[in-house]
Image (spheres, rainbow, N blue to C red):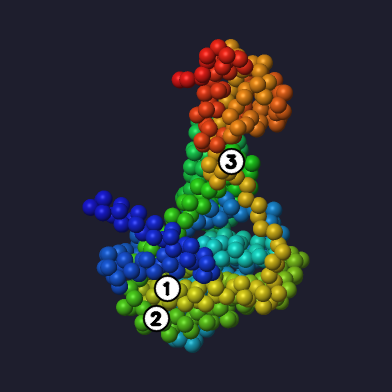
């Protein structure tokens, strides 16, 4: 049975990876494709059983932690630094405004019970990091505007999770607004302290601990983010804020094998997204969605056209009053339209469902409808909205992607050769190595310092050579280096071929 599940899981991942190409070309967030796979597998399709909101909540929270970790690791602090003050206001005051507006209107317009209306407002208050990253990183936006959206999506998960947890708890009825704000503030403070402690400590340790294999560094970095997450949760703090801050610090520190770490984190985040979205799709039942379509469309319209613009307007005004910077009306309009919802609201909707809150199953269905419909509406239209509002920056340079050894496209390898004591490489000049035409000594490390050698650079004992060679002539280059090490520069004349 395990073999069948492994085969099914691998097939889903491969199909999801292939579908990313289609989603990328169409401008749609890939989450919709992954949700579709889940719907096909679930009760409405092949009937694979999955009916546990408790398990969905646990898996979803873990997957969100991985996604937030990747977001922090790949965020360039120098690009978002100027945007963080406004992003913090949007992630706190903006979230509160959005919750209040949605709850007030749906309670009066749809006749929803007050607690359920507040939970719905809290569930929908967070923009989704995965959806924002997947769409906005392809848009040529000014750095400050892109930075606000990116930082906001990474920061607003924490307060919304706390709000949903508190509103869904058994003691919600006895809690006052002051108590609610106090508990939220304490959890955010604990999460921030843990994240700001684990991040620098982890960076310090990784810079000074020489691990035996490069592949251990990405594992260590991701493990540190989960240390931060778990530690904050155990201290009754915000694990999401802790994991994001830890990842942000580690991602902007000078760590060994940074490119490999970023690549590993991106792969882990993609796997988390695929698994989470497919799981949420399996949890949904299309047959029960019909009754949620009209309420979902009404609530989504309130969210997109009223709650989100008001939260941006209030946050921008407060930012200006606090002298944190002014946001033009064009930027405000784009920020309002670009508040994408994705898996986060659906995951958050499992919290009251798992807690047995009255009407929570219908709330889950309503949120599912909102995410699908309004992601289809907003995601593909963002480039047009940016051009219409005049906030697009087609001449803006994208981040330069730098890899430590991008040799795959050249079908080449990077060899490290150390000149040991007693080797006849000592005293040989680089041109006398007579390496094959597809190989070259590109760097020499000597006495802790590196330099680019010339043809007449004379090698010494304990030198470390970096040799770039094509795959076709790698064996020949290795044989030549062994031959010179044993027989000197005239090794060929003495019949030394460098064979094993």
Q: Which residue is drawn at 49% across and 81% down?
A: 299
Instruction: Reply above or below: 461 against 16.
Output: above
Q: Residue at x 57, y 75 (%)?
A: 381
Labelled pair 2, 1 in contact (Cβ < 8 Å): yes
Nearer-the-camera pick, 320 or 493? 493
Q: Residues within 10 Å of mark 2 (few under 14, many from 20)?
A: some
Q: How crowded is mark 3: few (under 14 residues within 10 Å), some or many (20 or more)?
A: few
Query: What residue is disc 3 on?
Result: 405
Question: In the image, 163: left or right of 253?
Answer: left
Residue 276 found in image quarter: bottom left
Sooner in the amino-acid sequence: mark 2 or mark 3: 2
Q: Residue at x 67, y 66 (%)?
A: 141
Query: For the view shown, which residue lies furthest in the right direction?
Result: 323
Residue 368 tag number: 1
Sooner in the amino-acid sequence: mark 1 or mark 3: 1
Question: In the image, 445: left or right of 219?
Answer: right
């Amino acid at each position: 049975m395990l073999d069948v599940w492994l085969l099914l899981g691998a097939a889903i991942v491969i199909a999801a990876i292939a579908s990313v190409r289609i989603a990328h070309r169409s401008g749609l967030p890939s989450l919709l494709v992954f949700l579709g796979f889940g719907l096909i597998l679930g009760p409405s399709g092949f009937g694979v059983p999955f009916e546990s909101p408790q398990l969905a909540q646990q898996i979803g929270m873990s997957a969100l932690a991985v996604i937030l970790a990747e977001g922090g690791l790949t965020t360039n602090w120098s690009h978002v630094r100027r945007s963080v003050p406004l992003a913090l206001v949007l992630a706190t005051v903006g979230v509160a405004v959005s919750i209040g507006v949605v709850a007030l209107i749906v309670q009066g317009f749809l006749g929803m019970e007050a607690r359920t209306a507040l939970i719905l407002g809290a569930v929908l208050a967070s923009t989704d990091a995965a959806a924002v990253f997947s769409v906005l990183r392809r848009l040529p936006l000014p750095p400050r505007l892109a930075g606000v959206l990116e930082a906001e999506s990474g920061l607003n998960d924490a307060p919304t999770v706390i709000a949903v947890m508190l509103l869904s708890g058994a003691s919600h009825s006895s809690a006052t607004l002051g108590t609610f704000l106090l508990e939220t503030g304490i959890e955010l403070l604990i999460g921030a302290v843990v994240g700001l402690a684990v991040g620098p400590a982890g960076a310090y340790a990784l810079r000074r601990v020489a691990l035996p294999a490069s592949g251990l560094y990405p594992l260590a970095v991701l493990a540190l983010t989960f240390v931060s997450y778990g530690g904050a949760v155990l201290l009754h703090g915000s694990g999401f804020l802790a994991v994001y801050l830890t990842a942000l610090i580690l991602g902007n520190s000078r760590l060994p094998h940074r490119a490999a770490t970023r690549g590993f984190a991106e792969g882990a985040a993609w796997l988390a997204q695929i698994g989470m979205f497919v799981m949420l799709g399996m949890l949904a039942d299309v047959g029960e969605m019909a009754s949620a379509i009209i309420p979902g469309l009404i609530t989504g319209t309130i969210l997109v056209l009223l709650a989100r613009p008001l939260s941006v307007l209030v946050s921008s005004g407060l930012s200006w009053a606090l002298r944190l910077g002014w946001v033009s009306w064009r930027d405000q309009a784009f920020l309002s339209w670009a508040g994408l919802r994705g898996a986060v609201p659906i995951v958050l909707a499992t919290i009251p469902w798992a807690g047995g809150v009255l009407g929570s199953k219908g709330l889950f269905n309503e949120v599912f409808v909102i995410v699908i419909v309004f992601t289809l509406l907003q995601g593909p239209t963002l480039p047009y909205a940016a051009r219409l509002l005049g906030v697009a920056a087609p001449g803006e340079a994208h981040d330069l992607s730098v890899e430590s050894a991008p040799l795959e496209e050249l079908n080449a390898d990077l060899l490290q050769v150390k000149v040991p004591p007693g080797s006849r490489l000592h005293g040989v000049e680089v041109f006398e190595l007579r390496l094959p035409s597809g190989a070259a000594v590109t760097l020499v490390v000597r006495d802790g310092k590196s330099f680019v050698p010339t043809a007449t650079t004379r090698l010494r004992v304990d030198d470390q050579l970096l040799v770039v060679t094509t795959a076709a002539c790698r064996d020949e280059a290795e044989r030549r280096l062994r031959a010179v090490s044993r027989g000197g520069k005239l090794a060929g004349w003495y019949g030394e071929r460098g064979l094993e």
